[in-house]
Amino acid sequence: DQQVKQNSPSLSVQEGRISILNCDYTNSMFDYFLWYKKYPAEGPTFLISISSIKDKNEDGRFTVFLNKSAKHLSLHIVPSQPGDSAVYFCAASADWAGKLIFGQGTELSVKP
Amino acid sequence: DGGITQSPKYLFRKEGQNVTLSCEQNLNHDAMYWYRQDPGQGLRLIYYSQIVNDFQKGDIAEGYSVSREKKESFPLTVTSAQKNPTAFYLCASSIREGATEAFFGQGTRLTVV
């Protein structure tokens, strides 16, 4: 049972445009959501997070939106840059952090 | 510099042999975790430990074993009972209380031939 789902395995965007990565979850007990960025053969690095008491969190070019009623979150990157090309994982936690449930990942390609 | 160190980065073993992956952290984090990454399946939790001398099974613990004798160390043994051990293994740690994100090591690519 996949509790966190990223239904788009890949996304291609032109440099300067907006990238929107989506994530759906099924467990209504999840109260903390995170996005990680991962390059091949490296560990994921934390990007941005959001608590269930908020619906938006912004950090520079990255914004995460949370729609609790739809059990959906999204990551917006604007403007997109070639260096943003990587695999992006969303993750969720229902209790103390660390025991994270990850989605399958979306590979973002930003073309010059 | 504080961080999580996994070693080795690449590891080859013959089928039927046990192998131990190392994970060390100097972040003073109480909690540590092992994840496995397979293509198209994201990261799946193998084992986690909230405190020294205590650990719990994750979603795919069969064929794996761990120990947590020291706060800084959380080695993972891939036993011969693991049916499909070739994968990319990631170790992570986090502050136990009021934590937010987990910090990951660089990973170990295990290939069983």
Image (cartoon, helix red, strand yellow):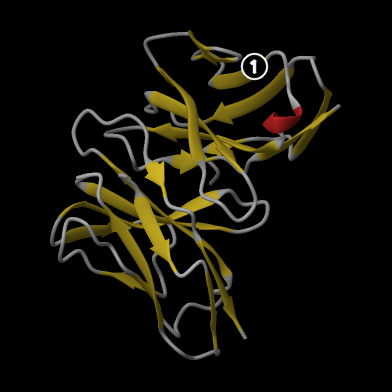
Q: From the top left corner, tell me how far across and down residue B99 is, in percent.
A: 27, 31
Residue visible at 44% across and 61% down? B60
Nearer to me, B7 or B66: B7
Nearer to me, A1 or A111: A111
Left/right of residue B4 with respect to residue A89 in the rendered view: left
Can residue A28 be seen here?
Answer: no
Where, by quadrant of the figure, is residue B77 drawn? Answer: bottom left
Residue visible at 79% across and 15% down? A16
Residue visible at 67% across and 51% down? B40
Label 1 is found on which chain of the structure? Answer: A
Number of numbered discs? 1
Residue visible at 37% across and 10% down? A53
Q: From the top left corner, tell me how far across and down residue B61 is, in percent.
A: 39, 65
Q: Quadrant of the C terminus of chain A?
A: top right
Can residue A34 be seen here?
Answer: yes
Dot 1, crowdedness within 10 Å: few (<14), some or many (≥20)?
some
Q: Secondary structure at mark 1?
A: strand
- Residue type pointed to by label 1: His
User: Residue B36, relative to residue A1: is it above or below?
Assistant: below
Left/right of residue A92 with respect to residue B97 in the rendered view: right
Q: Which residue is mark 1?
A: A76
Left/right of residue A89 with respect to residue A28 in the rendered view: right
Q: From the top left corner, tell me how far across and down residue A7 is, in percent.
A: 70, 35
Q: From the top left corner, tell me how far across and down residue A96 is, in percent.
A: 26, 34
